[in-house]
Image: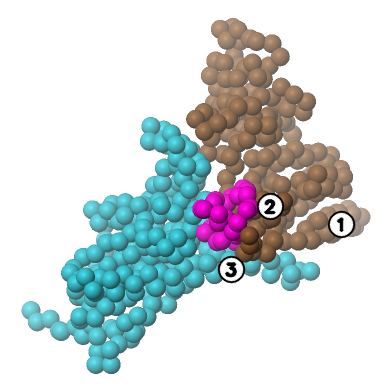
Chain colours: A cyan, B brown
């Protein structure tokens, strides 16, 4: 079986999808796309597409899970069977269960959960198309959906991955780079608070590379933060425009 | 001492509102001497208190609030009431009936049954216990007839208006009875069913456009338009 050599960075220093190493994919965020959820968001980041729904704070069932001093945050990351090339079984896999936990813990520090003791806040992240960076896009969109639901929070959480591909540090990895690159390091960050809420790494980096990578991830998160803010503001400004047109 | 936002500007969670000797009001939090917004909403500054009017959110009970609830369950001496909140309220027989009853002889379903809509007041609520209701008082008790609608609880202050200006205007213009629950439920009853329709439309408009100035005038215009539609429709 012969496998074609994959060129991740070409002679011009461009990546498989033609991006520069420090360039994000195109991001589109839509807020309030689901009528029945308390808050929702749809994010398209390159070819990665996902939908987030937030419900709550609401009565917690089963009751015995209730926390006496704060709300319980529950998170479900799930990939649609059609989101990847080979059909994925819809049953939650080990990876999805782990990502659900990781995303929950990335969002928790941002939320003021003690305002709603004994209740539950549910976050559902549905991956519609996966092309790398789904956990980061999930965190980004989930915090937008939580803000849309009116849940009090300290700051929005933005997330982005950095990685090492062909010996070079690159931002916002796509699926190919994730699979054939050397390092993948997802980072979630609260730009207003300068607080890292998630940091994972698979692969090896030197200390210098790690510091450089973290810096790159943080500056990427700050860019994503701007997208989140405009998306949220746009929804509420749209209503004002409608009224102005009427009168 | 600086204010970083304009009054009535849209603010987002984590946005810096003010620095220095200000007090943190509703929907804000304080870190050091800096005050930040915790929700998406409109900034409000009044007498050194910086707060945010939330655009969305659920109803959190407060003692003294008038709420409209729906009975969901009953026990020999109490009812469980859904008050459109993460917390279910309890209504005890002694808080509902003038005389105590003997649970062995009488079934409390006679008074309120599952599915009944009631108006009551919150008497007790804290972080550790679910709210308690009372229906003893003028105008409290079971509601029948009319119709019930739900809007976002954060828009209720706007629907009531300053000292009830908005709601009184609607009541007068449409000649109807309206009970507004702080929990976002509204009961409307008018002699003419067409007017009930208008009231529903008007309230939905207020919900959608709550944050935009000049609302009272737009609402008045809508009522006039709808009323004239009915008149011309009835004449032809």
Q: Nearer the viewer, mark 1 or mark 3?
A: 3
B210 displayed left or right of B33: right
- Looking at the picture, tell me which residue is in the foreground, B125 or B135: B125
Q: Secondary structure at mark 1?
A: helix
Q: What segment is highlighted magenta in the picture?
A: B11-37
Q: Secondary structure at mark 2?
A: loop
- Marks 1 and 2, the one that precedes in the sequence: 2
Spatial CA distance of label 1 from label 3 is: 32 Å
Q: Residue at x 9, y 82 (%)?
A: A2
Tell me, yes or no, whether dots 1 and 3 are on the same chain: no
Q: Which residue is mark 1?
A: B224
Furthest-right residue in this view: B235
Q: Is residue A210 visible?
A: yes
B89 displayed left or right of B227: left
Circles 2, 3 touching at the beta carbon (< 8 Å): no
Question: The residue marked by circle 2 belongs to what chain?
Answer: B
């Amino acid at each position: 079986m012969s496998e074609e050599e994959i060129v991740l960075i070409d002679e011009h220093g461009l990546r498989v999808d033609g991006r520069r190493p420090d360039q994000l994919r195109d991001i589109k965020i839509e807020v309030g796309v689901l009528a029945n959820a308390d808050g929702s968001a749809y994010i398209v980041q390159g070819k990665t597409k996902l939908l987030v729904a937030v419900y709550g704070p609401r009565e917690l069932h089963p009751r015995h899970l209730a926390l006496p001093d704060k709300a319980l945050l529950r998170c479900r990351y799930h990939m649609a069977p059609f989101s990847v090339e080979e059909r994925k079984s819809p049953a939650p896999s080990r990876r999805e269960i782990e990502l659900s936990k990781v995303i929950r813990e990335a969002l928790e520090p941002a939320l003021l959960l003690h305002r709603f003791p004994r209740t539950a806040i549910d976050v559902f992240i549905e991956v519609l198309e996966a092309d790398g960076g789904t956990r980061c896009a999930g965190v980004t969109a989930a915090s937008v959906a939580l803000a849309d639901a009116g849940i009090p929070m300290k700051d929005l959480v933005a997330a982005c991955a950095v990685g090492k591909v062909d010996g070079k540090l690159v931002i916002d990895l796509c699926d190919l780079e994730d699979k054939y690159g050397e390092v993948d390091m997802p980072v979630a960050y609260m730009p207003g608070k300068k607080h890292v809420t998630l940091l994972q790494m698979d692969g090896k980096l030197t200390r210098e590379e790690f510091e450089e990578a973290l810096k790159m991830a943080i500056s990427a998160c700050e860019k994503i933060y701007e997208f989140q803010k405009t998306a949220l503001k746009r929804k509420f400004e749209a209503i004002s425009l409608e009224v102005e047109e009427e009168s | 001492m600086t204010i970083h936002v304009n009054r009535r500007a849209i603010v987002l969670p984590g946005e810096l509102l003010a620095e220095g000797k200000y007090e943190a009001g509703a929907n804000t939090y304080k870190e050091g001497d800096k005050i930040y917004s915790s929700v998406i909403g409109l900034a409000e500054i009044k007498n050194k208190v910086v707060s945010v009017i939330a655009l969305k959110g659920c109803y959190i009970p407060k003692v003294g609030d008038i709420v409209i609830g729906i009975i969901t369950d009953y026990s020999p001496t109490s009812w469980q009431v859904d008050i459109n909140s993460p917390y279910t309220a309890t209504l005890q027989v002694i808080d509902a009936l003038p005389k105590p009853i003997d649970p062995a002889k009488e079934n409390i379903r006679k008074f309120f049954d599952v599915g009944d809509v009631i108006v009551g007041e919150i008497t007790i609520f804290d972080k550790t216990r679910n709210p308690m209701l009372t229906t003893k008082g003028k105008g409290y008790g079971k509601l029948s007839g009319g119709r019930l609608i739900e809007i976002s609880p954060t828009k209720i202050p706007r629907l009531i208006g300053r000292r009830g200006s908005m709601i009184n205007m609607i009541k007068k213009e449409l000649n109807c009875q309206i009970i507004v629950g702080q929990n976002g439920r509204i009961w409307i009853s008018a002699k003419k069913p067409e007017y009930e329709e208008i009231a529903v439309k008007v309230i939905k408009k207020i919900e959608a456009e709550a944050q935009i100035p000049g609302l009272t005038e737009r609402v008045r215009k809508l009522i006039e338009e709808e009323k004239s539609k009915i008149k011309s429709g009835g004449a032809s």
